[in-house]
Amino acid sequence: MFLLSLAWRSLRNRAVISGLTLLSIALSVALLVGIEHIRRGVRESFAGTIKGTDLIVGARGGTTQVLLSTVFGMSTPTGSVSWATYERWRAHPAVRWTIPYALGDAHKGQRVIGTTAEFFTRYRFRDRSVTFAEGGPPDTDREVAIGAEVAERLGYTLGSEVVLAHGVAAVSFAEHTAHPFIVSGIIDRTFTPIDRALYVTLDGLTAMHEAEEGAGGLMMGPPTPQTEGPAPITAFLVGTKNRFETLQLQREMNEDRSEPLTAIIPGVALAQLWQTIGSAEVGLRVVATLTLIVGLIGMCVALFASLESRRREIAILRAVGAGPRTIVSLLVLESGVLVTLGAITGVVMVYGGIVLARSAVEARFGVALTLHPLGSTEWIYLGVIVVAGTLVGLLPAWRAYRNSLADGLSPSL
Amino acid sequence: MSDSAVSRAGSTPAVAIRDLRFAYVAGREVIDIPTLEFAAGETVFLHGPSGSGKTTLLSLIAGVVTPRAGHLTLLGTDLTTLSSGARDRFRAAHLGYVFQMFNLIPYLSVRENITLPCRLSASRRSRVTDPEAAAQALAERLEIAGLLDSRVTALSVGQQQRVAVARALIGAPELIVCDEPTSALDADRRDRFLELLFANVAEAGSTLLFVSHDLSLAGRFDRTLALRELNRAATMGGI
């Protein structure tokens, strides 16, 4: 205990060097722990892209393709689902609600989705529902609700007239000029792909295509509207009455022979997708680890540099009875104190940073950083850092020991 | 280990050296002393020019370096038979050391510097009833009581040397070793320092081994020795 206080006061005596060393360790630790927090925040935000939906159902195809086309507005839909089939599943006793999705159109590179009012009441992301900054959902076949990014990028406001195009390319050949839409609402920023989409009613989408045919436009993509009944859709979201029935319902849908479908559980599909794209975080960790190694080497250098000026101090300690072991312990304690305080400071910096930057980060990047206690990974990191840092202190300590033997009681100054 | 009562009675010499040899580099001996003995309670002035092996001899007596051959007996204990850890404990318990200068740990207060041996050694601690009170008493005798809570960096060289003497004397160790403690002091301060040193060493009943190249100090001591004459390695040219 006396040695610890001696180590502490010795460090304080070299306050500037000790402070800078501590800061460099703290920054490395903050980087490592911060990356871990951001990684978790990103993963939670990613997993929160769609919540509350038990199944996403599309035409028979790959799991990832159904997920990407429906939730992320990427890739192309796996095909179409007939209205009759949709109706049949909607009436299934296990189903509580459904949201139909008709994809395939675009407006200046932004996706157009035909859906129903259910979307605005049932859809959940990160435990939130779709809310409007201005206006409300489309009611008539001439109204369109737009995502926050669409509004921002294209400068649309309530009442703006929007001409939708067919296909998803940024420049489209076939613009549905015969059936322009009016912006009925601008959706609050969600930091999900909703921000980059336009929402019309299913009727609106059909009316647009009919008007185009009437005007002699070119027709591609989604299947020709049936002569009887509403047009087919590309996918639908399902909420079940009882979560436990989800797996059973999924199997029923996947095995149904009347129209081949692929039903996926969003959480499972998102986790699988994260596995493939999440490997980028390994790179971040490598960089953070390298920073930490640099920090530890910096500490080692600082301790080594201090040794020369401390030969006298060590000789005094030797003279009043300290053995080499005491000298080594003193220096190892110093590195231990530095690295421990550095680790604590680093963690405090991360938590302080999250508190300060949380709202800004969420507003800017849509990553919800949460103040959660240190996870096991972080504890392992901190343990490794403290042990490694203390061991790094052994090098200068060993040197000090050798010096003290060579110097005896008269270090040449 | 020696019993302090015996050494103070004078029957056991404080330091006894026989055929002591030491070399930092093999074949180039810096110490070769056939025989040397200090009685308990004796004040000894040891002088010699630089290179005569003064500091090496003191390091050997302090047990910080180990002789290559021969015997070095302190208070009846042969240091050459002790492990290095036991030598460190022995030094802490029985020996006070004063350097030429820079005697103090810069980040400890004067009081903490004086009580440092008691913090590092349990047996030195057991020699005083209360280290704080002992430090206070020594400080008063050495006329530095007013400085006990000062930062050592605020002290003059003369004051620092007195603090070093107080630290060497706390717990009244049997042997006080001073390595040119007055070389940084002017004549007035040097005389006052020596007066205080002698008074306190006498009070503690310790043996004083005082090394200096300044022969004008020799008159105050019981005995004066020339290291050059004792150390055959030095007379042969030394280092």
Image (tube, rainbow, N blue to C red):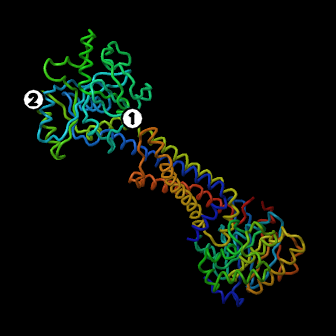
Which residue position holds label 2? A257
| Residue type (three-letter) at the residue carrying disc 1 | Glu
Q: Residue furthest left?
A: A258
Image quadrant in which you'd find residue A306:
bottom right
Residue A231 position within the rendered picture, expressed as x and y whole percent measured from the top left? 19, 22
Image quadrant in which you'd find residue A173:
top left
Q: Give me the chain letter of mark 1.
A: A
* Residue B229 seen in the current view: no
Which is nearer the eye, A126 or B56? A126
Which residue position holds label 1? A134
Residue B210 position within the rendered picture, expressed as x and y whole percent measured from the top left? 79, 75
Residue B76 position within the rendered picture, expressed as x and y whole percent measured from the top left? 65, 82
* Of the two numbered discs 1 and 2 in the rendering, the one whose residue sits closer to the viewer: 1
Helix, strand or loop for disc 2 = loop
Residue at the spot 38% in from the left edge and 16% down from the top edge: A171
Helix, strand or loop for disc 1 = strand
